[in-house]
Image (tube, rainbow, N blue to C red):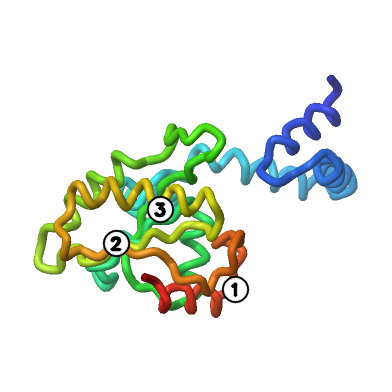
């Protein structure tokens, strides 16, 4: 396999990228200047050297401290915890400017084909929740902010049952309102739609 074919094959592994898109990416890289290609190479290399995972919310960030700025910000509302599937969903909620609580990135959703939870940070989430219920401003609501699709619904149901085993009944466990249309991904929703979904959570 030559260098072009190998790079196309690598791009095809990216989520949502098919053979034609992968070929377009490679053709674009062939057209741009050597300095632009070097910039891309250096940026990818820095992912392993400067990006780390926050031990509290589990999102990836490149800040100096190990704990990210969202988790270390004492102005965030510790009574609210939004559980999201991926970093992109967290970014979408932040961009909406509506949510001021804390986060936890689960690392995906349940695959309905296998119903396996491998790779999901369920145990870490439950440990995080146990710590969150203590303190002056203890946890009061867990928002299961997953995509409005069957996988997201299955994940929310699974976590609701798991959370109910460790938290008292007075802690609310909610899901986003259907301001999000069925089948929509959270990361692609516009800020107004996310705002509506947050306000209509139940």
The label on residue 139 is none
Q: Is any atom of residue 119 visible in this view? A: yes
Between residues 5 and 185, which one lies in front from this camera angle? 185
SS assignment at label 2? strand
Q: Which is nearer the eye, 15 or 185? A: 185
Q: Characterize the local packing of mark 2: few (<14), some (14-19) or many (20 or more) Cα atoms within 10 angstroms.
A: many
Secondary structure under badge 1? loop
Along the viewing direction, whichever of 63 and 77 lies nearer the viewer? 77
Q: Position of residue 10 (x, y in %)?
A: 73, 33
Pick whichever of labels 3 and 2 is earlier in the sequence.
3
Mark 3–mark 1 Cα distance, whole angstroms, equals: 22 Å
Per the image, label 3 sits on a secondary structure element best described as: helix
**Count of all numbered marks drawn on residues in the image:** 3
Q: Position of residue 64 (x, y in %)?
A: 38, 52
Say few, some or many: other residues with alpha carbon within 10 Å of mark 1 (under 14 / 14 to 19 / 20 or more).
Answer: some
Q: Residue at x 56, y 35 (%)?
A: 113
> Where residue 53 sits: x, y (%)?
40, 45
Q: Gap between marks 3 and 2, in whole Å?
A: 10 Å
Label of residue 173 in the image? 2
Q: Is residue 42 left or right of residue 76?
A: right
Determine which residue is flagged by label 1. 190
Q: Earlier in the sequence, mark 2 or mark 1?
A: 2
Please say if 7 is above or below 194: above
Q: Which residue carries the number 3 mark? A: 156
Gap between marks 2 and 1, in whole Å? 24 Å
Q: Quadrant of the N terminus?
A: top right
Residue 69 appears in view: no
> Badges 3 and 1: C-beta atoms under 8 Å apart?
no
């Amino acid at each position: 396999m030559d260098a072009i074919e190998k790079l196309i094959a690598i791009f095809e592994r990216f989520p949502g990228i098919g053979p034609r898109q992968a070929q377009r990416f490679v053709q674009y890289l062939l057209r741009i200047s050597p300095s632009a290609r070097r910039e891309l190479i250096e940026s990818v290399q820095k992912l392993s050297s400067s990006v780390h995972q926050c031990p509290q919310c589990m999102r990836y960030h490149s800040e100096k401290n190990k704990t990210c700025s969202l988790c270390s910000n004492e102005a965030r509302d510790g009574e609210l915890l939004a559980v999201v599937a991926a970093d992109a969903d967290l970014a979408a909620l932040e961009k909406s400017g509506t949510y001021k609580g804390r986060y936890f990135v689960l690392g995906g959703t349940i695959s309905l084909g296998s119903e396996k939870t491998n790779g999901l940070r369920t145990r870490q989430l439950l440990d995080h929740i146990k710590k969150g219920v203590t303190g002056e401003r203890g946890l009061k609501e867990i928002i299961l902010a997953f995509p409005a699709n069957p996988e997201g619904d299955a994940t929310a149901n699974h976590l609701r049952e798991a959370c109910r085993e460790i938290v008292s009944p007075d802690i609310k466990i909610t899901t986003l309102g259907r301001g999000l249309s069925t089948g929509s991904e959270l990361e692609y929703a516009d800020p107004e739609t996310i705002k509506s979904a947050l306000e209509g959570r139940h």
